[in-house]
């Protein structure tokens, strides 16, 4: 009974610490410190390095292991494979040079990082710090997506080319080091060396991907996605457990199966509502327990008392920085020195995979527990100071307001009035139209600036800047052309594609590609019926002063803020909030979340001001 009471007491302490840590960060305004790093530091306070209040047992070890598995799953889920697409046209930088090819440059930088890491690993072996070059190379070359992604989001750099390069380097490092870690375990764990068995795991992953792709958009799956069934969440957890079990069966680490599960879910492009649920469960329960326990198990005083380990800490920090600065210096061809150095510092951050490699290395007897603790301590240190240095060094962009580009393909009586209205607002509309039809349509050059095309073929549009628009509206006279162009622009990576279609047969295929469809006939029928049944509502929709507007929340400064505390000005009123598939009636205690679609009403002046604050922050 006493042992059971002690175990429950330790679990309660860890849970309470995990709950209080983000509150303390918020209250003390320590925004520069990642929450996961703060959780490790709090673990140090209550663990072996501090008051020794927590004693690991079966409960904590099980929950901590599950937290680690789920962390690896979410690391795989964070990988956005659309970033690997090189189809988007490159723009000119302020220096006048053309933007670099993000994927090519990122690949070259990672190759440089890996080669340098290998060389530095041999130096550490020659100095007698470690015996295994393979493991040391993985330790030095890995980069923490968990630190890179939030830092880029906070700096509003995810949409920029330099942000995409930094993200891609981290993604490639995550993928390569995770696979190599599995190979390392296969080679050194018991000397079996059954590396070929990993092919079974990857083959199972490919098979599951095609099965998931086949069933993802089935209507019966969508029907079971809500309520008490939550089939999407069940499928994700079944996938994780299956791949974790298979990973251990073929002699790899369970974290590789979890990481592969995350990659598969990311490839299947889940809706944001499901991703939010998984993030909430992981970062709200299991993962904090894991990070707190990392701190609990770490004995800093024993590390600092060991002269060899004490000497290794600064040398390893220097090695991590050197391995990133030299390859990243390739970016000096396009960017200024501060941007390059800041990027190198951010890529020096390392956390989750170092903890994984250190834990595995200790378990299979390749390194000592002191060495494992030193690697984890260095990872924590990099996660604290690298985001701070990045924010200090990275050049602040000017705050001139950037407008969203809207490309209209097809100039007609439907698109021309919308073009005119958008031109005076927060958008930068561009009209593309066939040269021969322009005169026939009676379109005046004095009223509309139109870029002429030979025809509406994809080849003609590829010569223009249309693919770099934030929104593409396709409204030519040919439905087949509209559908073909819509799919092509979506594949180019255009954020939103709106296509005019009157045929219901084509609409369903476009919805599967996440393309927004509008029909003139359906719009007219809907408006006429609304005018008959709800004239007051129609007045709201058509009156410029009291119209309804949709704003997407992209500014993370307002995430978690209640409407009662929202600092908006003017006469704007929140009418509805759409969150995933849910429709929420807003009230004072309603908390905003990223990617919420806010339906508001008010005068256009104040609505535009609100849009700048909430929706346009990504482009600031």
Image (cartoon, rainbow, N blue to C red):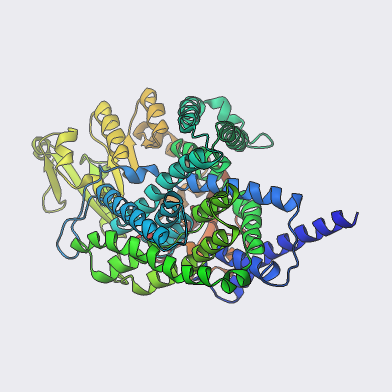
In this view of the protein, can residue 422 be seen by the observer? yes
In this view of the protein, can residue 567 be seen by the observer? no
Above or below for 462 versus 167: above
Quarter of the picture holding the N terminus: bottom right
Above or below for 190 versus 43: above
Above or below for 391 versus 583: below
Above or below for 448 versus 217: below
The reply, left or right, for residue 233 in relation to residue 459 is: right
Pick whichever, 349 or 415, lies toward us: 349
Marks counted in the figure total 0
Find residue 117 and report its image quarter: bottom left
- Most extreme residue toward the right, as rendered? 1
Where in the figure is residue 4, as x and y percent of width and height?
Answer: 85, 54
The reply, left or right, for residue 488 in relation to residue 254 is: left
Pick whichever, 267 or 156, lies toward us: 267
Where in the figure is residue 215, as x and y percent of width and height?
Answer: 51, 25
Quarter of the picture holding the C terminus: bottom left
Q: Residue at x 57, y 49 (%)?
A: 365
Where in the figure is residue 72, as x and y percent of width and height?
Answer: 54, 47
Where in the figure is residue 574, as x and y percent of width and height?
Answer: 53, 58
Pick whichever, 125 or 92, lies toward us: 125
The reply, left or right, for residue 12 in relation to residue 526 is: right
Find residue 333 and report its image quarter: bottom left
- Most extreme residue toward the top, as rendered? 505
Q: Residue at x 30, y 70 (%)?
A: 397
């Amino acid at each position: 009974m006493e042992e059971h009471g002690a175990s429950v007491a330790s679990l309660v302490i860890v849970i309470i610490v995990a709950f209080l840590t983000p509150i303390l960060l918020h209250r003390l305004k320590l925004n520069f410190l990642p929450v996961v790093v703060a959780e490790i530091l709090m673990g140090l306070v209550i663990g072996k390095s501090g008051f020794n209040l927590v004693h690991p047992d079966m409960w904590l070890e099980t929950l901590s292991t599950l937290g680690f598995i789920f962390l690896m799953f979410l690391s795989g889920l964070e990988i956005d494979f659309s970033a690997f697409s090189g189809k988007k046209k490159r723009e000119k930088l302020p220096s006048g040079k053309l933007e670099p090819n993000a994927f090519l440059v990122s690949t070259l930088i990672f190759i440089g990082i890996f080669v340098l890491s290998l060389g530095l690993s041999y130096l550490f072996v020659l100095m007698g710090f470690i015996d295994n070059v393979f493991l040391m190379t993985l330790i030095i070359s890995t980069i923490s997506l968990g630190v890179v992604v939030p830092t880029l989001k906070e700096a509003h750099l995810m949409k920029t080319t330099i942000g995409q390069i930094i993200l891609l380097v981290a993604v490639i490092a995550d993928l390569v080091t995770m696979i190599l870690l599995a190979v390392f375990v296969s080679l050194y764990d018991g000397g079996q060396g059954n590396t070929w068995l990993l092919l079974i795991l990857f083959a199972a992953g490919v098979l599951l991907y095609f099965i998931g792709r086949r069933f993802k958009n089935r209507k019966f799956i969508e029907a079971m996605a809500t309520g008490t069934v939550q089939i999407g969440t069940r499928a994700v957890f079944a996938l994780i457990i299956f791949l974790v079990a298979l990973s251990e069966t073929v002699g790899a680490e369970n974290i590789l199966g979890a990481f592969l599960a995350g990659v598969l879910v990311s490839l299947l492009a889940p809706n944001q509502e499901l991703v939010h649920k998984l993030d909430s469960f992981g970062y709200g329960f299991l993962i904090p327990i894991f990070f707190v326990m990392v701190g609990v198990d770490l004995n800093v005083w024993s590390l600092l008392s060991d002269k060899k380990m004490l000497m290794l800490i600064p040398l390893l920090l220097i090695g991590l920085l050197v391995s990133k600065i030299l390859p990243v210096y390739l970016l000096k061809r396009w960017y200024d020195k501060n941007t390059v150095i800041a990027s190198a510092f951010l890529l020096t951050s390392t956390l989750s995979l170092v903890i994984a490699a250190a834990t595995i290395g200790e378990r299979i007897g390749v390194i000592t527990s002191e060495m494992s603790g030193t690697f984890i301590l260095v990872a924590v240190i990099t996660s604290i100071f690298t985001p701070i240095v990045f924010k200090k060094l990275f050049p602040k962009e000017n705050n001139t307001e950037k407008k969203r580009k809207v490309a209209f393909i097809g100039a007609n009586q439907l698109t021309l009035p919308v073009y005119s209205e958008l031109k005076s607002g927060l958008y930068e509309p561009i009209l593309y139209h066939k040269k021969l039809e322009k005169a026939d349509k009676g379109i005046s050059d004095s009223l509309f600036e139109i870029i002429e095309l030979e025809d509406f073929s994809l080849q003609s549009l590829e010569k223009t800047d249309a693919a770099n628009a934030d929104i593409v509206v396709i409204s030519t006279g040919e439905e087949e052309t509209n559908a073909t162009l819509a799919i092509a622009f979506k594949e180019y990576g255009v954020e939103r594609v709106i296509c005019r279609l009157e045929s219901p047969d084509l609409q369903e295929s476009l919805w599967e590609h996440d393309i927004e469809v509008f029909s003139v006939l359906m719009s007219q029928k809907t408006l006429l019926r609304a005018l008959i049944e709800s004239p007051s509502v129609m007045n709201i929709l058509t009156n410029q002063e009291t119209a309804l507007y949709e704003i997407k929340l992209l500014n993370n400064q307002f995430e978690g803020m209640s409407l009662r505390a929202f600092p908006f000005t003017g006469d704007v009123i929140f009418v509805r909030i759409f969150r995933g598939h849910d429709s929420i009636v807003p009230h004072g205690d309603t908390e905003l979340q990223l990617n919420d679609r806010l339906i508001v009403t008010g005068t256009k002046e104040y609505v535009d001001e609100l849009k700048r604050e909430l929706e346009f922050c990504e482009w600031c």
